[in-house]
Image (tube, grey):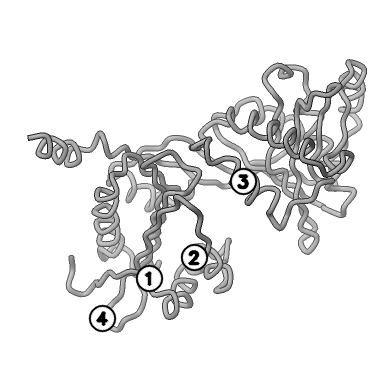
Amino acid sequence: MSSAIRVRPVCLESDIPGIVRLLNACDPEDPTTIEELRSEIGHTAPGKITLRLVAMDKDEAITGYIYVVHSAEAPSRHFYIWVRVDPTLRNRGIGSVLWEAALDYLHVQGAIRIACAVRDSDPASLSFAEHRGFTIDRQHFYSTLDLTAFDETPYLPGISAIEAQGIRFCSLADFPETPETRRKFYDLNFSVVMDIPGEDWDYAAYPQFFNDRILGAAWFRREGQLLAVDGDNWVGFASVSLSPETQSACNATTGVTRAYRGRKIALALKVMAARYACQHGAQTIRTGNDSLNVPILTINRKMGYRPQPGTFLLVRWLKENKEFTAEKAVSAE
């Protein structure tokens, strides 16, 4: 480790302003605040494991930051890692020092899988990750739809045809707030999430995630959970959140249960998500995409969504790493 670079655990009281300045210098398009970071650091859940380190220069200024987490809903020994270095101080070994400290911690934790994300427009960060054993697994990106130019008219005959087959489109707000309603909404969410490409879940933890991060989220509105229903069966949904301050919306998830796929129900739900957003003053709507989710990508292109710059998800399996294998062999002896 370079004598000019000192790494230590984050001090909650003194480091947060410096970390926020660093994060905003690295990601000016997605700024954070002191309050948001303090809330994030303060959020704990059973089974969550975290490590946060900062790199300091000789003047005690924060020059780098690394965050390692095993979230409560992730499979055992699966971790995620973020590395950020002051853009004006790159190529001086700061990221390498932070990475080595984190890797030591991950070995102690018995980690077998590490994931990270880098912007697809950042070849330097991609090279940094690839030189440390990470390989690209998939690409994540947002696509946006200009609602001021979107015309739903061509899709209305198709929606009518689906309704003629007995499918009813409505929202969660059309059902009473009861344990049975909540159970059916959970079952629908879970059946869809299980088939989303690339999701790294410990499904036993999904009920807590559903309660805290969906039903308990600040963005959640029952009328924004659009449903496709066949009699007593809930067969599809599109989740929409609104941001009135920016006249925008987000279609977070759209999915249909396996038995009802291939009937253009997902397309109908996405059209209705756009309609709902328009009705509430949104001029744009965005949705997250996975490069392996071909059916949804096809729908988005058909509707006119335009892909935006995104991120590569990279993965490294430590059980295939030479030093990790060597350590296991020594232990076995």
Q: Residue at x 51, y 34 (%)?
A: 198
- Vertical placement of 28 versus 182: above or below? below
Q: Which residue occupies the extreme left position in the image?
A: 333
Quarter residue 35 falls in: bottom right
The answer to whether the residue labelled 3 contacts the one labelled 1, judged by CB atoms less than 8 Å apart, is no
The image position of residue 313, as x and y in percent, is 45, 42
Front tag of 4 and 1: 1
Look at label 4 and name its amino acid.
Answer: Lys
Which of marks 1 and 4 precedes in the sequence? 1
In the picture, measured across the screen, residue 231 lies left or right of residue 21, that is: right
Q: Earlier in the sequence, mark 3 or mark 1?
A: 1
Q: Classify 10 Å Cα crowding around label 1: few (below 14), some (14-19), many (20 and above).
A: some
Task: Identify the residue under disc 1.
Answer: 10
Tag 4 residue:
58
Left or right: 64 as drawn, with respect to 104 = right
Instruction: State yes or no: discs 3 and 4 in contact (Cβ < 8 Å).
Output: no
**Residues at marks 2 and 1 touching, judged by CB atoms closer than 8 Å:** yes
Looking at numbered disc 1 in the image, what kind of residue is underneath it?
Answer: Val
Query: How packed is label 3: few (under 14 Cα within 10 Å), some, or many (20 or more)?
Result: some
